[in-house]
């Protein structure tokens, strides 16, 4: 789960990491009431990076100017995300920008500290153009991140004296935060030298979804659409897409290849929906309900390969909640004869071949709607 910068900074502040004073607003009129020292920086709160480049970060030297900037940024769209909240913070006078992060590094099978004196730029860009400017430190899974490692990283970034001591404290604190909050990524970019001290100008925190249950006071995730959240509450893996063919399959791999098949025949999937292994008739009913809820659905493609999942269970689910839009069904594998029989009895036709069924689904979606439909 990704957190907004202002949410991450609240957690940073709790751990004693240095962040600017600031407040979040949802309307330009709120700026006047803020007790902040000017100039301020006005920052779009969206869950994507590169806000600065996209024009979502602006400096303002008076409340009037700040109000105008907030108004301009609210309602902006940054990489497809509409800005509905803006962070107004006391601006820092930045002398140098560094990068610091702790990241779950699958290739190292552990946590890695990543730092660079080339901060303020996306780390992927630094890695691509000047990889020698990135320094790393592997965290021993049994010992944790050690202060000497922080000092070593700091020296390699060029810090000495009091700045090195500050860097060490920020580094070890960020690691503690990363660990205690079950983060996947804790990133400061830029970690700035401002007014003679190090300051976390930006904060990015991605939490491990598998550990969310251990953290009760987290804000609600904003990464899912309401429909995705509802599907998740029923134990279905569902992702909204922008096509017009609803998709239901069993197993993530099968559903992925189902999306590819539709694309191959010129169709566009409206969603990814995996009913999971061993799906019951009830799960199938719920899946049908969720998959057809989105507006603009013109056809549905149900692609089931029975393994642990039994075709007769699936068929019973379909019969209980028959598709409301033209459907193409492929049903094969465990208990397929029984499944096919149940569907036939209800007047529903299902095939055995995925390619044929995908092609049929694309055809159905292209057909002009009959009168009285929709
Ligand atoms: P991002 O573009 O989404 O990563 O947003 P950041 O918070 O990292 O800001 C992008 C850039 O805007 C930073 O690298 C800084 O150069 C600049 N910036 C952000 N906050 C301030 C500030 O308080 N003062 C100054 N002078 N520049 C800032
Ligand atoms: Mn940044």
Image (cartoon, rainbow, N blue to C red):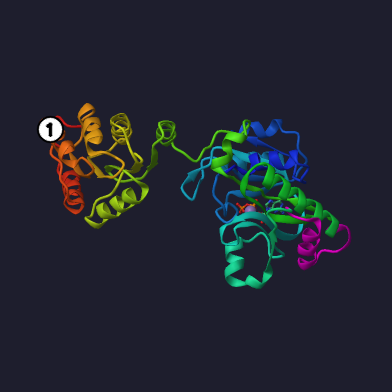
Residue 349 location, quadrant: top left
Q: Which residue is mark 1?
A: 371
Screen quadrant of the C terminus: top left
User: In this rendering, does residue 246 appear at all?
Assistant: yes
User: In this rendering, does residue 41 appear at all?
Assistant: no
Q: Position of residue 189 (x, y in %)?
A: 67, 55
- Please give the range of residues in magenta: 144-163
Q: Is residue 250 above or below residue 35?
A: below
| Left or right: 312, with 230 as reference point | left
| Left or right: 99, with 207 as reference point | right
Q: Nearer the viewer, residue 264 or 354?
A: 354
| Mark 1 surroundings: few (<14), some (14-19) or many (≥20) residues within 10 A | few
Taking the magenta stretch, the answer to whether it contains residue 303 is: no
Residue at 59% x, 42% y: name it.
Answer: 3
Residue 161 location, quadrant: bottom right
Screen quadrant of the N terminus: top right
User: In the rendered picture of this protein, how many numbered marks are placed on residues?
Assistant: 1
Q: Is residue 322 above or below residue 83?
A: above
Most common secondary structure along the magenta stretch? helix
Q: Position of residue 358 (x, y in %)?
A: 21, 50
Q: Position of residue 372 (x, y in %)?
A: 14, 29
Q: Position of residue 42 (x, y in %)?
A: 65, 44
Residue 296 location, quadrant: top left
């Amino acid at each position: 789960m990704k957190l907004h910068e202002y949410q991450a900074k609240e957690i940073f502040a709790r751990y004693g990491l240095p962040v600017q004073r600031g407040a979040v607003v949802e309307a330009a009129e709120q700026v006047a009431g803020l007790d902040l020292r000017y100039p301020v920086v006005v920052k779009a709160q969206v869950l994507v990076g590169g806000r600065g480049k996209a024009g979502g970060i602006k400096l303002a030297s008076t409340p009037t100017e700040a109000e105008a900037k907030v108004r301009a940024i609210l309602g902006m769209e940054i990489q497809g995300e509409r800005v509905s909240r803006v962070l107004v913070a006391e601006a820092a006078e930045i002398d140098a920008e560094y990068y610091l992060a702790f990241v779950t590094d699958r290739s190292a099978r552990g946590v890695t500290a990543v730092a660079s004196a080339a901060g303020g730029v996306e780390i992927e860009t630094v890695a691509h153009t000047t990889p020698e400017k990135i320094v790393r430190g592997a965290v021993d899974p049994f010992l944790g991140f050690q202060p000497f490692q922080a000092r070593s990283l700091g020296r390699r970034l060029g810090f000495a004296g009091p700045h090195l001591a500050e860097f060490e404290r920020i580094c070890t604190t960020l690691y503690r935060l990363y660990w205690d909050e079950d983060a996947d990524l804790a990133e400061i970019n830029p970690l700035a030298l401002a007014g003679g001290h190090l300051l976390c100008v930006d904060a990015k925190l991605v939490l491990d979804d598998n550990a969310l249950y251990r953290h009760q006071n987290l804000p609600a995730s904003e990464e899912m659409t309401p429909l995705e959240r509802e599907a998740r509450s029923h134990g279905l893996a569902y992702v909204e897409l922008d096509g017009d063919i609803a998709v239901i399959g069993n197993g993530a791999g099968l559903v992925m290849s189902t999306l590819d098949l539709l694309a191959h025949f010129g169709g566009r999937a409206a969603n990814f929906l995996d009913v999971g292994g061993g799906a019951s008739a009830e799960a199938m009913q719920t899946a049908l309900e969720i998959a057809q809820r989105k507006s603009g659905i013109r056809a549905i493609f149900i692609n089931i390969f029975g393994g642990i999942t039994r075709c007769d269970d699936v068929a019973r689910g379909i019969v209980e909640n028959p598709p409301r839009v033209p459907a193409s069904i492929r049903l094969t594998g465990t208990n397929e004869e029984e499944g096919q029989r149940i569907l036939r009895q209800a007047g529903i036709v299902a095939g055995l071949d995925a390619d044929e069924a995908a092609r049929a689904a694309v055809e159905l979606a292209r057909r002009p709607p009959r009168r009285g439909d929709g």
